[in-house]
């Protein structure tokens, strides 16, 4: 096919779409089902309507091929576990009794059975359920969900392409099941898994699928020769199947590197590649292997992870270069649109001019369709769209929001000394022990306490004008009093004020910093039914006035025990926002760090002796390629130290991280120079404690003993056993006792019981210590 005919064949498509609905209908239906207010039939009907609406929106926008199978009640990796029959032994009875309840038991656990481990999906803030596999795992195909959703889309008149997690990525994301050898490699199960994929592919072909997409984002990470050989074997075998649809192998989030030649040579009909800035090297690499003659290329030229409008002319140039490198070039986003909000049209509080700089899922769909039209018919067919796009890009570049001379001057004046504590840790530790007087195995929580319906109603009432400021603040004071009283009665050693005034750990601060924009309806799935509204980092950052001092000092006035000041760190403020793409992230991080440094200084001046700066996103934002990591970790750790290093030696600084793989950033955790770190560890059975010990981590640490992402209440002995495991890695004088994460999403009854058990476990284990 000539370049001209390839352009004429160009089509628009997407890999996936937001699941929740315009008003988070899916969240409400699922949570209603959990509480017994929504029947299973009603839940499934809501889901079917959301799928129908999504497909129709895409088709109406001009998308030629809609995805199916990307919709999920909780997580698409968990859906894959069901599809391949890899149900953990402890959940099989529940799944057999009721598939829906068993599915949610795997995701959330029950009082009797622990859930699957949860961690971040590559370098995003989406969480997936980690498959548990062992030498005895037996796979079996269950294509019911994938086939049913394909048939739904076809019946509604759409051209549809099922999307599945690919076999390599599924196995590379898995962990050894409980009881399996610690060094077991799930990838050794590939030959056992491929026949199951073959069966699913045959079922989808029989149901009417022309194409099936197999997502292999794990191949954009550094892979060993053995793993690349496994990829070659997998797609050789799948490609050799006679009873299958055409195969489109998709990668995203970064460049493919050594995996690109492997996939280019594979006997599959198409590849989908990321051509946005992070993966620009894919273009040169594709040319170097001679392109994809006779194959389909789906070009991800619209950023599926950020919300800024596309530079249409630049993307058309990339697409033009790709013509001639494949038999057919189609246009898409760089990844699933799951990672962005649904529609800018719902926003009413953002300046209309600024709103034109933004593209959520619906707007990105329009950009994709416009680019496909321009590629197929030429730029004359999209003259108006190109002119409007140029004007919007120029408006953003010239806006005073994006450039504050005072902020930039302060940032440029930062020195290395500004990011270093005045004394080494050993001296600080002694001063803090004398100042705080804490027992061995001190107990604390991560920061937030349950956000009740009453708190949310008060916040909504304030926004709507139904409640005045004085009434709202009295409600917050009452909540803080109750939280402090509960913690004192329970026996916790370092208290928190519970954060009742905070809507979100990032948004709360973003709304008080210059340079940020907040959305009203910009919801994005974090995990399960947990949705967040990432703020938009649009310009230079500064802090006009204190943000947390008032409520922290009020809480401290209610108790003689230390109350932690609670802040969100600079890396997380970037990672859980939609960050600006017009300057290096290191520059933005330094601006945020300086604003937070002012807050830390004010907290200390107001009498706060313990200050926690949360950085759960430090690992999440780690580049997927090892060669890119040193530069990132240099500026990320410097930004944290810049935030925290202006305090006295006897002020204890904490940080917190959760639900990520920490083993490969232990040195960076050390480089933060925080006095205490708390980390998620309950679901992973104290793995992080062992990793810290292996590194020789010298400071204090609190690996969590209470999994807050499950409604189950851990017993005293269960928590005590985890503590005993932690003590094998971390000495008692440096071990803290705390939950995995904040308690915002939990209900009060389970929170009370769990924290009471946590304190009791700490007392039990203290009594077992030789020095007790």
Image: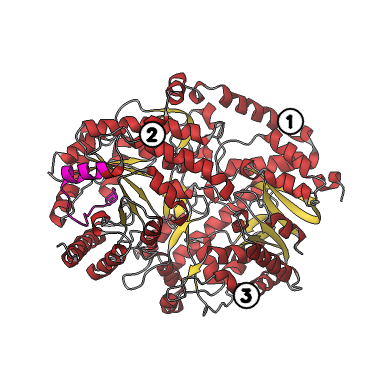
Is 573 magenta? The answer is no
Question: In this view of the protein, can residue 478 be seen by the observer?
Answer: no
Mark 1 nearby-residue class (10 Å; few <14, some 14–19, many ≥20): few
> Dot 3 lies on which element?
helix
In this rendering, the answer to whether 761 lies above or below 359 is below
Question: In this view of the protein, can residue 91 be seen by the observer?
Answer: yes
Circle on res. 419? 2
Q: Where is residue 61, by image quadrant? A: top right
Q: Are marks 3 and 2 in contact (CB under 8 Å)?
A: no
Instruction: Tell which residue pokes out farthest to the right in this image.
Output: 2
Q: CA distance from mark 3 to mark 2?
A: 53 Å
Q: For the C terminus, which image quadrant?
A: bottom left
Q: Which residues are magenta?
A: 427-452
Circle on res. 196? 3
> Dot 2 lies on which element?
helix
Position of 513 with respect to 363 (left or right) is left
Mark 2, mark 1: which one is toward the viewer? 2
Q: CA distance from mark 1 to mark 3?
A: 49 Å
């Amino acid at each position: 096919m000539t370049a001209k005919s390839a352009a004429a064949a160009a089509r628009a498509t997407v890999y996936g779409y937001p699941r929740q609905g315009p008003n988070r209908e899916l969240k409400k239906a699922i949570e209603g089902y959990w509480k017994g207010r929504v029947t299973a039939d009603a839940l499934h009907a809501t889901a079917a309507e959301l799928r129908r609406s999504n497909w129709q929106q895409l088709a109406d926008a001009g998308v030629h091929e809609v995805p199916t199978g990307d919709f999920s009640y909780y997580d698409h990796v968990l859906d894959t576990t069901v599809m391949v029959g890899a149900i953990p032994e402890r959940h099989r009875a529940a799944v057999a009794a009721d598939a829906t309840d068993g599915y949610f038991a795997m995701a959330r656990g029950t009082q009797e059975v622990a859930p699957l481990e949860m961690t971040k999906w590559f370098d995003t803030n989406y969480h997936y359920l980690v498959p548990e596999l062992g030498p005895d795992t037996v796979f079996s195909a269950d294509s019911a969900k994938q086939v049913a959703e394909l048939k739904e889309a076809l019946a509604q008149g759409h051209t549809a392409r099922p999307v599945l997690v690919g076999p390599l990525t599924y196995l590379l994301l898995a962990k050894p099941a409980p009881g399996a050898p610690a060094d077991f490699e799930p990838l050794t199960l590939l030959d056992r898994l491929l026949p199951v994929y073959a069966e699913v592919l045959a079922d989808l072909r029989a149901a009417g699928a022309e194409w099936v997409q197999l997502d292999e984002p794990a191949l954009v990470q550094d892979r060993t020769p053995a793993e690349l050989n496994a990829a070659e074997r997998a797609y050789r075998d799948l490609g050799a199947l006679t009873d299958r649809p055409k195969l489109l192998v998709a990668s995203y989030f970064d460049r493919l590197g050594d995996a690109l030649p492997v996939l280019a040579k594979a006997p599959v009909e198409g590849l989908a590649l990321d051509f946005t800035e992070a993966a620009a090297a894919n273009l040169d690499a594709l040319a170097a292997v001679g392109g994809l003659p006779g194959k389909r290329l789906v070009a991800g030229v619209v950023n599926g992870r950020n919300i800024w409008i596309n530079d249409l002319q630049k993307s058309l140039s990339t697409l033009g270069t790709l013509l001639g490198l494949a038999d057919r070039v189609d246009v898409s986003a760089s990844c699933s649109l799951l990672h962005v909000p649904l529609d800018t049209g719902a926003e009413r509080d953002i300046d209309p001019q600024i709103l034109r700089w933004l593209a959520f899922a619906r707007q990105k769909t329009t950009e994709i369709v416009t680019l496909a039209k321009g590629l197929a018919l030429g730029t004359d067919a999209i003259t108006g769209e190109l002119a409007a796009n140029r004007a919007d890009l120029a408006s953003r570049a010239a806006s005073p929001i994006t450039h504050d001379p005072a902020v930039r001057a302060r940032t440029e004046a930062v020195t290395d000394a500004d990011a270093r504590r005045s004394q080494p840790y050993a001296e600080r530790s002694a001063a803090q022990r004398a100042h705080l007087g804490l027992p061995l195995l001190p107990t604390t929580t991560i920061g937030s306490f349950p956000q009740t319906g009453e708190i949310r109603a008060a916040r909504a009432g304030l926004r709507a004008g139904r409640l005045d400021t004085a009434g709202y603040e009295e409600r917050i004071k009452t909540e803080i009093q109750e939280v402090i009283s509960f913690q004192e009665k329970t026996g916790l050693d370092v208290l928190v004020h519970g954060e009742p005034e905070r809507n979100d750990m990032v948004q709360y601060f973003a709304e008080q910093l210059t340079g940020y924009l907040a959305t009203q309806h910009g919801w994005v799935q974090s995990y399960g039914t947990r949705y967040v509204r990432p703020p938009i980092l649009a310009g230079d950052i500064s802090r006009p006035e204190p943000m947390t001092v008032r409520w922290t000092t009020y809480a401290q006035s209610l108790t003689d025990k230390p109350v932690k000041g609670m802040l969100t760190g600079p890396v997380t403020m970037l990672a859980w926002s939609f960050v600006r793409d017009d300057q290096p992230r290191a520059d933005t991080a330094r601006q945020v760090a300086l604003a937070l440094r002012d807050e830390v200084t004010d907290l200390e001046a107001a009498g706060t002796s313990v200050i926690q700066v949360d950085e759960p996103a430090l690992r999440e934002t780690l580049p997927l390629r090892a060669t890119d990591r040193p530069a990132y970790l240099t500026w990320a750790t410097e930004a944290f130290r810049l935030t925290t290093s202006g305090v006295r030696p006897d002020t204890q600084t904490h940080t917190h991280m959760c639900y990520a793989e920490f083993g490969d950033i232990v040195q960076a955790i050390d480089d933060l120079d925080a006095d205490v770190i708390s980390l998620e560890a309950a679901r992973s059975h104290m793995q992080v404690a062992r990793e810290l010990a292996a590194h020789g981590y010298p400071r204090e640490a609190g690996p969590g003993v209470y999994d807050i992402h499950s409604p189950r209440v851990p017993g005293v002995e269960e928590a005590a056993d985890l503590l005993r495991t932690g003590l094998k890695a971390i000495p008692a004088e440096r071990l803290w006792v705390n939950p995995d994460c904040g308690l915002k999403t939990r209900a009060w009854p389970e929170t009370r019981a769990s924290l009471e058990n946590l304190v009791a476990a700490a007392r039990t284990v203290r009594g077992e210590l030789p020095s007790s």
